[in-house]
Image (spheres, rainbow, N blue to C red):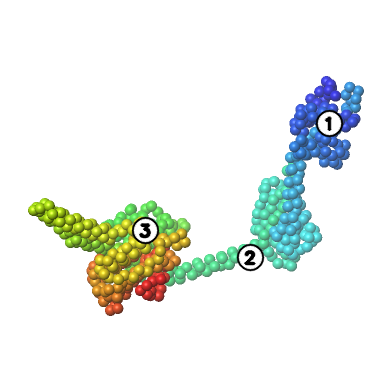
Amino acid sequence: MRSEAVDTLLALAPDPTIVVDRRVRVVAACDRAARLFDRPRTEIVGAPLDTVISGGVLDPEAKLYALRPDGLELPIEISVRVVEIDGETVLAVGLRDVTERRRRAATLREESERFRRLFEDGPVAMALADPDMRLDEVNDAFCELTGYGRDELTALSLADITHPDDVSISLRLAGQAFAGELPSFSVDKRYVRKNGEVVWVDVTVSSIRDEDGRPLKGLGVMRDISERREALKRAHAELERLERDRDRILEFAGEGIYHVDGRGTITFVNPAAEAMLGWPAEAMVGKPAHELLHHRRPDGSPYPRSECHLHGRSGARLESIADDVFWRADGTPMNVQYTSAPVDEPDGGMVVVFADVSERVRMEAELAESRQRAERARMQAAEDERARWARELHDETLQGLAAVHVLLSSGLRAANEADRRDRMRSAQEQVEGEMEKLRGLIADLRPPALDELGLAASVRDLAARMQAIYGIEVDIDVPAEPDGERPRPAPEVETVAYRIVQESLNNVAKHARCDWASVALRQAPGTLEVCVCDNGTGFDPEHQTGGFGLRGMRERVDLLHGRLTLRSGPDGTEVRAALPMLDGAGDQDGAAASRSPTMPHSIA
């Protein structure tokens, strides 16, 4: 059906509209209806009504849905009216999308149900009151709070259960809330329970209004704060007691305490301050604090009050100073650490709490001097090491090169070719020998194997050279290089371990007068243990010489926060070190290793 009358009907309809004939088929549809169904209008026209709308169109109680091609059912409402078009009776069906309205209605129902559950079953006391202040609804928690049953409470008003002293303020605030002057309010008040007991509650009241803003009910939420009020009461009593005992607390305080007013004049001094400063309280009270205690800087130069950050004109402020000087009654300085805090009083002023830290300052100065001595010792040790290598190069390498020079010079003056070849061959042998010695010196300085092959290979190489050069039998108990399951020590740890073995074997060769030594390495959790033993004559560890060897070992171990122990006697010497595997691995690992049982000459 398509006529001018139908087009006019569809154009004037306020909502998306379709036209249905007596056979319940769609005979016309507007563009808005096509968009609502998400279909071309040609698909809608001619289709049975139940293929585009589900539900009974003429059933006012039915829920209707617009059926879309993608299967989506869009909630709709319809309005139906009978019209005559070109002599034929048809139905004009107006369509309205009610998705959002149904969603809001569902949300409102859900929120109402949630509020109802919260109101009925929640642990917080709640009540609804009418504008005349009578209780309309209460929950179980409110009944438990007041001691009344539901029926008893709904027959009462708020004034009936409120303490007489709190009725006036409660009614005034509630009246302002219902009048719209207050959106809500909170107040601490007292209820009188059914048994006459008084209970303190924190009440928060909000007004519930209709769409026109007229008050319907007041919602009250109540929390029992009796324990909190009792705690506050006890706190006030405790504060009063502390105020009474304040003078005694100040009297027995270990720190010096004094108070100055806004002009910087001392008004109070405790006994600790008297003892530290050497003045009786009566000699200090009424005196300007700066001119009495703080008049000179630590170097003795004058300290004007205008420049003083403690008593100066900038005013009292909260601060803590770690290093300053107060001057005693006898004119001697006292190193102090103090905290100053302003006092919130009409007269202003501040309280200064100070402690005598002269002993700490003295110890810090001694520690700094000790560090300087240690640094000088390290520098001297480095110079001694350089001097030792200079002697080695002079006595060994330089002398060998001089011999080569003599051989080469004499070869140039040789009388015949055979004599010249002999001397050149001797020079070549001499150069090869010196090259071997240089390799040994270079290996002593930094063995290539330590970087390329690791600690174990370097220690084996060092022991082999010791055995070859000095003829001392050296037993080696060194594990294989670390694999993926066993971590490798940090490079600096391997270097220190190698130097300990190197220096210990040098001492064995030069001083021990022995024919046997052993080197053992063991890797414990977080710790690398090193042990070097010999069967020599030993020495007295308490009377060590000033040589670099042992001192250098100790310094290297200390830098890693490790432990070095030395045992020596007629049956030989044992040097043992426990080194942390990594930087900062801690003294605990090293300490634990140093307390372990003494390792035998061969460490497994």
Question: Which residue in the structure is indicated by mark 2?
Answer: 227
Pick the front one: 588 or 574: 574
Give whichever of 400, 596 is nearer the camera: 400
Name the residue that disc number 3 marks.
453
Instruction: Give the alpha-carbon distance from disc 2 to disc 3, as whole Å.
Output: 74 Å
Specify whether residue 305 is in view.
Answer: yes
Q: Are marks 2 and 3 in contact (CB under 8 Å)?
A: no
Left or right of 18? Residue 571 is: left
Q: Secondary structure at mark 1?
A: loop
Residue at x 83%, y 35% (from the top left corner):
51
> Reading the chain from its start, which is encountered first: label 2 or label 3?
2
- Precedes in sequence: disc 3 or disc 1: 1
In the rendered structure, find residue 417 and report the number of the disc placed on it: none
Evaluate if marks 3 and 1 touch, with contact meaning CB atoms under 8 Å apart: no
Label 1, on which residue?
47
Q: CA distance from mark 2 to mark 1?
A: 74 Å
In percent of the image, x 41 and y 71: which residue is there?
Answer: 604
Sequence-first tag of 2 and 1: 1
**The one of 75 and 224 positioned closer to us in this rendering:** 75
- Count of picture labels: 3
